[in-house]
Amino acid sequence: MKNFELYNGVKIPANGYGVYQISKNDCKNSVLMAINAGYRHIDTAQAYFNEEEVGQAIAECNVARSELFITTKVWIDNYGENKTYDSVIESMKKLKVDYLDLILLHQPIGDYFAAYRDLEKLYLEGKVKAIGVSNFYEDRLVDICLQAKIKPMVNQIEVNPFNQNIEAKEWADKYNVVIEAWAPFGEGRNDMFNNPVLKEIGAKHNRSVAQVILRWLYQRGIVSLAKSVHESRIKENFDIYSFELDDQDMAKIKGLDTKNSLFFNHQTPEMVEWFYKLIESRRNN
Ligand SMILES: NC(=O)c1ccc[n+]([C@@H]2O[C@H](COP(=O)([O-])OP(=O)(O)OC[C@H]3O[C@@H](n4cnc5c(N)ncnc54)[C@H](OP(=O)(O)O)[C@@H]3O)[C@@H](O)[C@H]2O)c1
């Protein structure tokens, strides 16, 4: 396993395991499979409604807490002075941990400056080792970097071969913010796993398309967060350190960028409305 380093010296494992859309029933076992495969970095969120199941896996995994890197994210209905703070303490209880390695604001929507000040407080009290944001595209990221007393250490955004976010990475680099890639496979959209360019590069190195993508992110200095509920794929996705992409491979992958999200544009008014309603629909499921 390899680490990147945040600007405050905290080491972050370069490839993490994400639990979005893993059901409560599957979550504990999936996280245990990931930890057994070598993963030490687990990414969840209040809005995934599976923090308790992640916590059960943390409690049962027989790996020291100090070796694990646990991230959760605050949902927008928990934004607000003291409200964010309390919600993070509640998340820590569900996760059965007495500190978090990383806490993120999930979206730049709602009263996120008040929420961010609570993250700063948690950081100064030592309850979280690092703080950051998610889905803060270039303008929002620069704004919070210039406003905050403690700059975000991480920004988690969509990055995959079809949406490479090169400018977002450049702006993050300027402020020493590490980028984490959500949906590194774009959930398989646009037939990513069968893309001929990625398949050809995989065949050249005797690796799968998934391994090529995760290796490409690693070589760009981007933390990847991959999700799978299948043990063989979990092992495959963790095995990215025994080969290297050369300049030609990197250039070919760069040519796949469409500069468009495979999911949605966070900056439309319709999406803002959708995010405000989202939590109710998930809570009622
Ligand atoms: N901050 C945010 O707003 C945000 C948004 C989305 C995601 N995330 C984070 O990013 C993580 C990953 O994103 P994601 O789950 O949306 O998508 P993803 O990791 O890009 O794709 C997951 C899909 O790929 C399949 N898959 C995984 N490994 C594979 C392999 N080796 N070969 C073939 N298929 C494979 C999985 O199927 P199986 O499970 O059936 O194997 C699943 O359908 C999330 O779990 C979450 O932690 C964050």
Image: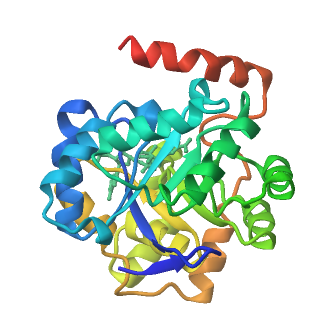
Eyeballing the image, is 21 above or below 165? Answer: above
Could one spot residue 261 in this view of the protein? no
Residue drawn at (65%, 75%) of the image: 7
Eyeballing the image, is 149 above or below 236? Answer: above
Front position in the image: 8 or 257: 8
Q: How is the image coloured?
A: rainbow
Eyeballing the image, is 145 above or below 109? Answer: below
Viewport quadrant of the N terminus: bottom left
Residue drawn at (51%, 43%) of the image: 73
Residue drawn at (79%, 54%) of the image: 148
Q: Which x, y percent locates residue 36? A: 16, 65
Front position in the image: 158 or 108: 108
When asked about the image quadrant of residue 81, the answer is top right
Could one spot residue 35 in this view of the protein? yes
Viewport quadrant of the C terminus: top left
In this rendering, position of residue 171 left or right of residue 95: right
Eyeballing the image, is 17 above or below 244? Answer: above
In this rendering, position of residue 96 left or right of residue 20: left
Residue drawn at (24%, 31%) of the image: 24
- The total number of labels drawn is 0
Q: Which x, y percent locates residue 138? A: 81, 53
Which residue is most to the front?
Answer: 125
Q: Which x, y percent locates residue 134? A: 62, 47
Front position in the image: 199 or 95: 95
In this rendering, position of residue 101 left or right of residue 65: right
Q: Which x, y percent locates residue 185? A: 47, 53
When asked about the image quadrant of residue 235, the answer is bottom left
Front position in the image: 11 or 218: 11
